[in-house]
Amino acid sequence: MDYVTGGDADLSIRRIGTHGHRSGTIGPRPDHVVFWLADGRARLTADDGSSWDVGAERPMMLSASVAYSFDTDATAMTLLHLAPALLGDRDGVAEFRQPDAADPRTEPLRALLRDVTGRVLDPTLRADERAAVNRRIATVVLSTFAPSRSDVEHRMRRAIRFVHDEAGRPLSVADIAASCGLTERGVQALFRRRLAVTPMQYLREVRLDRVHLELGRSRSGALLVSDVARRWQFTHLGRFAAHYRARFGEQPHETIARGPGAV
């Protein structure tokens, strides 16, 4: 395998020469990657089932949070790695639309890359010049592959619905991530950015709300707080009581005392 690389932490280019047919998977990764083939064809399939037949010289975006499978007979390809922050995606969870093969928006990117690839690969390029080249490339990449906000919102809704539907059983960050097709890092970033909490903090709040609802509806003495807490996966009762008071401003037994069975 022939391999040439150059660039910096924000943007790098990797040229790969291979021999013969290749297939495999590309898991979620820290960077967004634009790739294009020098020859041959490739079949690319995303983890949501979307697929593309890719010909030579067609640039394609691999979104950082998405897993892909591929099958190709190309003997040479180029990979453009872009740090999410360079594209305004602080958390690496944005997804990008693939333009059609004949979309004229891809031509400015192809032309720019023909012009600047040698400079990106040049180890003697000054830092200020490299930063300027990086910004030029990022601007054209963003105009070629528009971020798909609707998909991010869809994944957020799927994760929230999963938490609400499954709150009564043991769950991990990995379970929540799998429910919406993101990596654990991706789902953590998505919850922090949209809700200002971690997935597990959000799950705890949902469970506390369920306990509060049950206790508020109970008749005095009809329920044991410990039974309700454990049913909603609170196994450490001391921590449960502290979280409950912080969220509702009262102890669980005070909620029961205000319920329909109160005298």
Image (cartoon, rainbow, N blue to C red):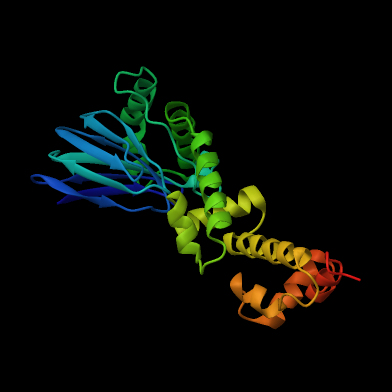
**How many numbered discs?**
0
Q: Quadrant of residue 72?
A: top left
Q: Position of residue 87 (x, y in %)?
A: 51, 39
Q: Is residue 68 left or right of residue 256?
A: left
Question: Is residue 227 positioned above or below 9 on the image?
Answer: below
* Residue at 49% over, 58% down: 176
Residue at the outermost left position = 20
Q: Quadrant of residue 53?
A: top left
- Judge by depth and name the residue closer to the eye, 223 or 132: 223
Question: Is residue 107 positioned above or below 18 on the image?
Answer: above
* Residue at 36% over, 23% down: 106
The quarter of the image holding the C terminus is: bottom right
- Judge by depth and name the residue closer to the eye, 177 or 78: 177
Q: Is residue 140 left or right of residue 58?
A: right
Q: Position of residue 201 (x, y in %)?
A: 64, 63
Q: Position of residue 230 (x, y in %)?
A: 61, 76
- Judge by depth and name the residue closer to the eye, 225 or 177: 225
Question: Is residue 44 positioned above or below 203 on the image?
Answer: above
Q: Is residue 201 left or right of residue 140?
A: right
Q: Is residue 259 left or right of residue 132?
A: right
* Residue at 85% over, 73% down: 254
Q: Position of residue 133 (x, y in %)?
A: 45, 36
* Residue at 61% over, 62% down: 203
